[in-house]
Amino acid sequence: MADDTDALAGAQAFVFDVFGTVVDWQGSVSAALRARTEGAADEDWVAFAKEWRQGYYETTRRVAQGGAGPGNVDVMHREILDRMLASERWQHLARLWADEERRELVLIWHRLDGWPDASEGLYALKNKAIIGTLSNGNVRLLVDMAKHADLPWDVVFAGDLLGSYKPNPKMYLGAVRHLGLRPEQVVMVAAHIADLRAAASHGLRTVYVRRPTEDAPTVRADVRAKAVGGEVDAVVDSFAELAALVG
C-alpha cells in the first residue's frame, strides 16, 4: 500500500482499465479455449491468448494514433482471430472453428473472470465514490463482463462510446467531461504504467495495481508512489487496499 494515505483526498470518481487490471484475461481466455477444444488438448492456449491480445494492443494503439482499424473491439477480435488461424503457427486449428464457432470464440472476451479481489473491492469503493470503466472495450462487451464477474460499475466508458482508444486524449478527457468533474478529481486505476502516464498527462490522478500478468516484473517492482519519490499517486496490490485509501 502507498505510504501517503492522503494521496487520493478529494477524489470523486475512479475509472478503471479493465483487461488485466480488473479481470484476468489470460487465465480466462486460455481456460475457455481449452474447454472448447477437447481434440487439441496439447495446444499452448496461453500462447494463443497472448498472441490474440498482442494483436489487440497493436491495433488499438494504431487507431489511437489516427491509423486505420475497427472502432469496435468485437470486430477487432474477430479480425485478429481470422489472421491468426491463417498463420503458419495456428492454421491447423482453422478446421476446428467455422464461422459460427469463431463468433462464439470472440464472445469469450465478454465473459472474463475478475481477479479474486475485484468484485468485493469495487463494492467497497462504490460506497465512497463513483466507479466506472475507462476501457478500449465496447459498451456491450463491458456490460456483459460486468454481469458475468459481478462488477458494480456506476458508469461504463468505452472505446466505441468515446470515439477512440487509449492513449488518445479523447478517452481520458471524455470520461472527465461526462462525469462533470475536473481532471484532478478523477483517478485512473490501471495495471499498466503506460496507461497511467497518459492519464496523468491530462491531469488525472493515478493508482497502479500490481497484477501478475501485466507489465514486466521489473516494471512492477519499479513503480512507486509520489510519496516515496515515484510517479503515481498510489500503488496497491488489491482493490481492497485501494478502497482503504479512500476516506
Image (cartoon, rainbow, N blue to C red):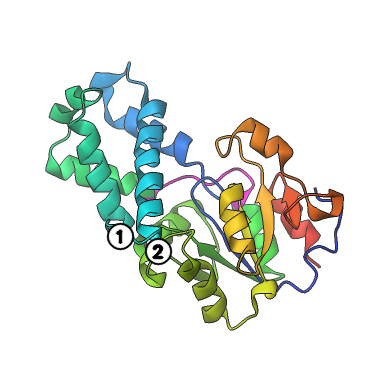
Image point 72% across, 71% down: which residue?
11
Q: In terms of sequence position, does the residue under pointer 2 or pointer 1 come before the other?
A: 1
Give the dominant element type of the magenta stretch: helix, strand or loop: loop
Q: Determine crowd level at label 1: few under 14, some 14-19, many 20+ residues with C-alpha closer than 10 A.
A: many
The numbered disc on residue 107 is none
Q: Determine crowd level at label 2: few under 14, some 14-19, many 20+ residues with C-alpha closer than 10 A.
A: many
**Contact flag, marks 2 and 1 (Cβ < 8 Å):** yes
Q: Amino acid at mark 2?
A: Gly
Left or right, 48 with respect to 220, comes to left
Residue pointed to by mark 2: 159
Secondary structure beneath dot 2 equals helix
Q: Over which residues does the magenta segment extend?
A: 110-118
Q: Let me know if residue 114 is in the magenta part.
A: yes
Q: Amino acid at mark 1?
A: Asn
Secondary structure beneath dot 1 equals loop
Residue pointed to by mark 1: 72
Where is residue 231? Give x, y as percent.
Answer: 73, 53
Question: Residue pushed farthest bottom?
Answer: 180
Q: Let me know if residue 106 is in the magenta part.
A: no
Image point 67% across, 50% down: which residue?
208
- Name the quadrant of the C terminus: bottom right
